[in-house]
Image: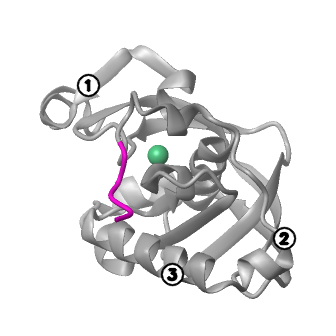
Amino acid sequence: MYEIVKTGDPVLRLTAKPLNSDEIQSEAIQQLIAAMAERMREAPGVGLAAPQVGVSVQLVVIEDRPEYIERLSGAERREREREPVPFHVLINPVLSVEGEESAVFFEGCLSIPGYQGLVARARVVRVEALDERAAPVVIRAHGWYARILQHEIDHLNGLLCVDRMDLQTFSTLENYDRFWRGG
Ligand code: ZN
Protein backbone atom coordinates (compact mmCIF):
# COMPACT_ATOMS: atom_id res chain seq x y z
CA MET A 1 0.00 0.00 0.00
CA TYR A 2 1.07 3.56 -0.74
CA GLU A 3 3.68 2.58 -3.30
CA ILE A 4 5.05 5.47 -5.37
CA VAL A 5 3.14 5.75 -8.65
CA LYS A 6 4.94 6.59 -11.88
CA THR A 7 4.21 8.98 -14.71
CA GLY A 8 1.34 7.82 -16.89
CA ASP A 9 -0.87 7.03 -13.89
CA PRO A 10 -3.88 9.37 -14.26
CA VAL A 11 -3.89 10.14 -10.49
CA LEU A 12 -0.83 12.34 -11.11
CA ARG A 13 -2.90 14.55 -13.45
CA LEU A 14 -5.86 15.19 -11.14
CA THR A 15 -6.43 18.31 -9.05
CA ALA A 16 -6.13 17.01 -5.49
CA LYS A 17 -8.93 17.46 -2.96
CA PRO A 18 -8.46 19.79 0.05
CA LEU A 19 -8.77 18.29 3.56
CA ASN A 20 -10.82 19.71 6.42
CA SER A 21 -9.66 19.80 10.01
CA ASP A 22 -11.49 16.59 11.03
CA GLU A 23 -10.09 14.73 8.04
CA ILE A 24 -6.56 15.95 8.81
CA GLN A 25 -6.75 14.58 12.35
CA SER A 26 -8.29 11.27 11.26
CA GLU A 27 -6.45 7.98 11.66
CA ALA A 28 -6.46 7.50 7.88
CA ILE A 29 -4.64 10.75 7.14
CA GLN A 30 -2.18 10.29 10.02
CA GLN A 31 -1.35 6.84 8.62
CA LEU A 32 -0.98 8.32 5.14
CA ILE A 33 1.54 10.86 6.50
CA ALA A 34 3.56 8.13 8.23
CA ALA A 35 3.59 6.00 5.07
CA MET A 36 4.62 8.97 2.88
CA ALA A 37 7.50 9.83 5.25
CA GLU A 38 8.70 6.25 4.97
CA ARG A 39 8.42 6.16 1.14
CA MET A 40 10.22 9.50 0.82
CA ARG A 41 13.12 8.34 3.00
CA GLU A 42 13.53 4.94 1.38
CA ALA A 43 13.49 6.44 -2.16
CA PRO A 44 15.32 8.68 -1.05
CA GLY A 45 13.73 11.98 -1.97
CA VAL A 46 13.34 15.45 -0.50
CA GLY A 47 9.59 15.70 -0.96
CA LEU A 48 6.54 13.61 -1.76
CA ALA A 49 2.98 14.62 -2.62
CA ALA A 50 -0.03 12.43 -1.74
CA PRO A 51 -1.00 11.88 -5.42
CA GLN A 52 2.41 10.21 -5.82
CA VAL A 53 1.21 7.42 -3.55
CA GLY A 54 -2.12 7.28 -5.37
CA VAL A 55 -4.14 9.47 -2.98
CA SER A 56 -5.57 12.61 -4.57
CA VAL A 57 -5.58 14.92 -1.52
CA GLN A 58 -3.78 18.23 -0.89
CA LEU A 59 -0.97 16.97 1.30
CA VAL A 60 2.82 16.97 0.88
CA VAL A 61 5.75 15.93 3.04
CA ILE A 62 9.18 17.58 2.76
CA GLU A 63 12.57 16.80 4.29
CA ASP A 64 16.03 17.69 3.01
CA ARG A 65 18.48 15.87 5.25
CA PRO A 66 22.06 17.05 5.93
CA GLU A 67 23.46 13.75 4.58
CA TYR A 68 21.87 14.41 1.16
CA ILE A 69 23.50 17.82 0.99
CA GLU A 70 26.92 16.50 2.03
CA ARG A 71 27.11 14.70 -1.33
CA LEU A 72 27.24 18.04 -3.17
CA SER A 73 30.36 20.11 -3.60
CA GLY A 74 30.57 23.44 -1.79
CA ALA A 75 30.02 25.23 -5.11
CA GLU A 76 26.93 23.14 -5.90
CA ARG A 77 25.51 23.85 -2.46
CA ARG A 78 26.08 27.59 -2.75
CA GLU A 79 24.72 27.86 -6.31
CA ARG A 80 21.60 25.93 -5.38
CA GLU A 81 21.25 27.70 -2.03
CA ARG A 82 20.62 24.29 -0.55
CA GLU A 83 20.37 23.89 3.21
CA PRO A 84 18.85 21.18 5.39
CA VAL A 85 15.07 21.34 5.88
CA PRO A 86 13.56 19.35 8.78
CA PHE A 87 10.64 17.00 8.15
CA HIS A 88 7.30 18.77 7.90
CA VAL A 89 3.83 18.28 6.47
CA LEU A 90 1.88 20.85 4.43
CA ILE A 91 -1.85 20.51 3.81
CA ASN A 92 -3.99 22.65 1.43
CA PRO A 93 -0.93 24.77 0.56
CA VAL A 94 -1.31 28.04 -1.32
CA LEU A 95 1.89 29.24 -2.94
CA SER A 96 2.77 32.72 -4.11
CA VAL A 97 5.93 33.84 -5.84
CA GLU A 98 7.84 36.70 -4.22
CA GLY A 99 9.96 38.98 -6.38
CA GLU A 100 11.09 38.53 -9.95
CA GLU A 101 14.14 36.31 -9.55
CA SER A 102 14.25 32.82 -10.98
CA ALA A 103 16.76 29.99 -10.80
CA VAL A 104 17.41 27.26 -13.38
CA PHE A 105 18.69 23.87 -12.23
CA PHE A 106 18.36 20.19 -13.05
CA GLU A 107 15.43 18.62 -11.27
CA GLY A 108 13.98 15.13 -11.10
CA CYS A 109 10.88 13.43 -9.71
CA LEU A 110 10.32 10.12 -7.90
CA SER A 111 7.42 9.52 -10.31
CA ILE A 112 9.77 9.89 -13.32
CA PRO A 113 12.66 7.82 -11.97
CA GLY A 114 16.04 7.90 -13.67
CA TYR A 115 15.75 11.25 -15.45
CA GLN A 116 16.47 14.91 -14.86
CA GLY A 117 16.20 18.13 -16.82
CA LEU A 118 16.53 21.86 -16.42
CA VAL A 119 13.56 23.56 -14.77
CA ALA A 120 13.25 27.30 -14.12
CA ARG A 121 11.66 28.08 -10.76
CA ALA A 122 11.03 31.21 -8.72
CA ARG A 123 13.88 31.84 -6.27
CA VAL A 124 11.66 33.05 -3.41
CA VAL A 125 8.16 31.86 -2.51
CA ARG A 126 5.65 32.17 0.29
CA VAL A 127 3.36 29.28 1.27
CA GLU A 128 0.32 29.32 3.52
CA ALA A 129 -0.88 25.92 4.63
CA LEU A 130 -2.03 23.75 7.52
CA ASP A 131 0.24 21.36 9.39
CA GLU A 132 -0.57 17.76 10.44
CA ARG A 133 -2.57 19.05 13.45
CA ALA A 134 -4.56 21.42 11.18
CA ALA A 135 -2.76 24.48 12.59
CA PRO A 136 -2.00 27.29 10.13
CA VAL A 137 1.60 27.78 9.02
CA VAL A 138 3.26 30.42 6.86
CA ILE A 139 6.60 29.69 5.19
CA ARG A 140 8.87 32.03 3.31
CA ALA A 141 11.53 30.07 1.46
CA HIS A 142 14.34 30.73 -0.99
CA GLY A 143 16.74 28.66 -3.06
CA TRP A 144 16.43 24.89 -3.11
CA TYR A 145 13.69 24.76 -0.47
CA ALA A 146 11.60 27.15 -2.60
CA ARG A 147 12.18 24.77 -5.55
CA ILE A 148 11.03 21.75 -3.50
CA LEU A 149 7.87 23.61 -2.44
CA GLN A 150 7.05 24.57 -6.04
CA HIS A 151 7.68 21.02 -7.28
CA GLU A 152 5.54 19.35 -4.61
CA ILE A 153 2.68 21.84 -4.77
CA ASP A 154 2.61 21.44 -8.58
CA HIS A 155 1.80 17.75 -7.94
CA LEU A 156 -1.39 18.82 -6.14
CA ASN A 157 -2.46 20.66 -9.27
CA GLY A 158 -1.82 17.76 -11.62
CA LEU A 159 1.48 19.16 -12.88
CA LEU A 160 4.80 17.36 -13.28
CA CYS A 161 8.25 18.93 -13.58
CA VAL A 162 8.43 17.81 -17.23
CA ASP A 163 5.59 20.29 -17.94
CA ARG A 164 7.97 23.10 -16.96
CA MET A 165 11.19 21.52 -18.21
CA ASP A 166 13.49 22.61 -21.00
CA LEU A 167 12.97 19.26 -22.74
CA GLN A 168 16.15 19.59 -24.80
CA THR A 169 18.01 18.97 -21.52
CA PHE A 170 15.91 15.92 -20.51
CA SER A 171 18.63 13.40 -19.54
CA THR A 172 19.16 10.06 -17.91
CA LEU A 173 20.96 10.37 -14.56
CA GLU A 174 23.98 8.71 -16.14
CA ASN A 175 24.13 11.30 -18.91
CA TYR A 176 23.48 14.09 -16.43
CA ASP A 177 26.66 13.04 -14.57
CA ARG A 178 28.52 12.55 -17.83
CA PHE A 179 27.60 15.67 -19.79
CA TRP A 180 25.82 18.22 -17.62
CA ARG A 181 26.95 18.05 -14.02
CA GLY A 182 29.15 20.99 -13.12
CA GLY A 183 27.86 22.98 -16.08
ZN1 ZN B 1 7.74 14.95 -8.12
Q: Which mark is residue 171?
A: 1
The image quadrant that residue 142 belongs to is bottom right
Give coordinates of residue 35: x percent, y percent.
42, 75
153 relative to 97 in the view: left or right:
left
Which residue is identified by label 2? Answer: 20
Give coordinates of residue 163: x percent, y percent.
55, 23
| Crowd tier of the residue under label 1, counting other residues whose Cα lies within 10 Å: few below 14, some 14–19, many 20 or above | some
Mark 2, secondary structure of its residue: loop
The CA distance from mark 3 to mark 2 is 16 Å
- Amino acid under label 2? Asn
For the C terminus, the quadrant is top left
What range of the chain is rendered magenta?
A: 1-5
Residue drawn at the location 29% of the way across and 77% of the way down: 67
Residue drawn at the location 68% of the way across and 84% of the way down: 26
Which residue is identified by label 3? Answer: 31
Give coordinates of residue 149: x percent, y percent.
63, 56
113 relative to 137 in the view: left or right:
left
The CA distance from mark 1 to mark 2 is 40 Å
Mark 3, secondary structure of its residue: helix
